[in-house]
């Protein structure tokens, strides 16, 4: 039914979003610019330059470099302590008979590091990162690139995403989209299937 399965990484396969939320809130507070979870949710699924633009617009007086240094350090420490897989991730990866790729807004080094820590690096033929495209999600470019690396039409690729940003990118690329919201609820505007977990989404899409 599908030629390839394309997965977002953070919040879809691995539970990094909760680490990012906790350490981000702490970094902003320590810098004297406390923010709430709603503000943090606006950054979910965004590449770093886009997230920085959102922060600068909302907090023009903030020392963004200092906040980022503090946030990156705390986040990296959290990641190194271990990255649990999202519910159903291990089962779905083991059941898949199609070739698999990661499509993430994380940079290349960070993406490969997370995959190694989570123990799933060997599952994927391709890893498309922020460093591989000029226009990141929600533009369709990352998913178009992933499909082209396999030589498949985007419409033959099933995508698993958690965020609105990622689901929009996959939808605009012409892929079939399963959205499993993580820390931010969604009405599934860009999804063909809105699911509570990965395995339910796979069933809804007819994959298993």
Image (cartoon, rainbow, N blue to C red):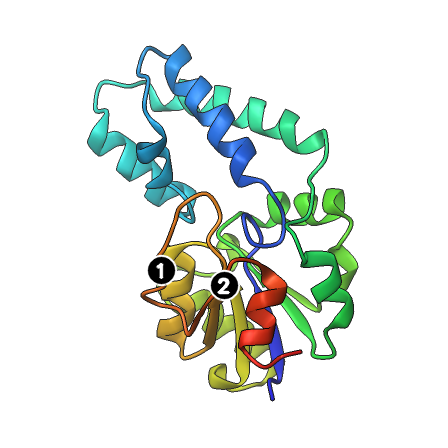
Disc assigned to residue 138: 1
Residue at x 62% of width, y 54% of height: 13
Few, some or many residues within 10 Å of mark 2 (<14, 14–19, 20+):
many
> Residue 206 in the image: x percent, y percent?
58, 81
Q: Nearer the viewer, mark 2 or mark 1?
A: 2
Q: Secondary structure at mark 2?
A: loop
> Residue 4 in the image: x percent, y percent?
62, 78
Q: Secondary structure at mark 1?
A: loop
Q: Is residue 97 above or below residue 127?
A: below
| Viewport quadrant of the C terminus | bottom right
- Horizontal arrangement in the rendering, residue 200 relative to residue 114 (left or right): left
Residue where numbered disc 2 is placed: 195
Residue 36 seen anywhere in this rendered image of the structure:
yes
Residue at x 44% of width, y 19% of height: 27
Residue at x 29% of width, y 32% of height: 55
- Horizontal arrangement in the rendering, residue 87 relative to residue 95 (left or right): left
């Amino acid at each position: 039914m599908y030629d390839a399965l394309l997965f977002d990484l953070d919040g879809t396969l691995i539970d990094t979003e909760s680490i990012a939320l906790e350490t981000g809130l702490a970094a902003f507070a320590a810098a004297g610019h406390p923010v709430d979870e709603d503000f943090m949710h606006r950054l979910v699924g965004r590449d770093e330059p886009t997230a920085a633009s959102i922060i600068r617009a909302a907090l023009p007086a903030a020392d963004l470099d200092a906040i980022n240094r503090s946030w990156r350090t705390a986040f990296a420490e959290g990641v190194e302590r271990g990255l649990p897989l999202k519910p159903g991730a291990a089962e779905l990866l083991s059941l898949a008979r199609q070739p698999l790729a990661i499509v993430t807004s994380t940079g290349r080094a960070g993406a490969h590091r997370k995959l190694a820590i989570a123990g799933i690096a060997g599952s994927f033929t391709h890893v498309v990162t922020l460093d591989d495209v000029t226009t990141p999600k929600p533009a369709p470019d990352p998913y178009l690139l992933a499909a082209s690396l396999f030589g498949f039409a985007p419409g033959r690729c099933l995508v698993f995403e958690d965020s609105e940003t990622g689901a929009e990118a996959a939808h605009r690329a012409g892929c079939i989209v399963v959205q499993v919201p993580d820390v931010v609820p969604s009405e599934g505007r860009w999804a063909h299937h809105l699911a509570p977990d990965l395995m339910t989404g796979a069933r809804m899409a007819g994959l298993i």
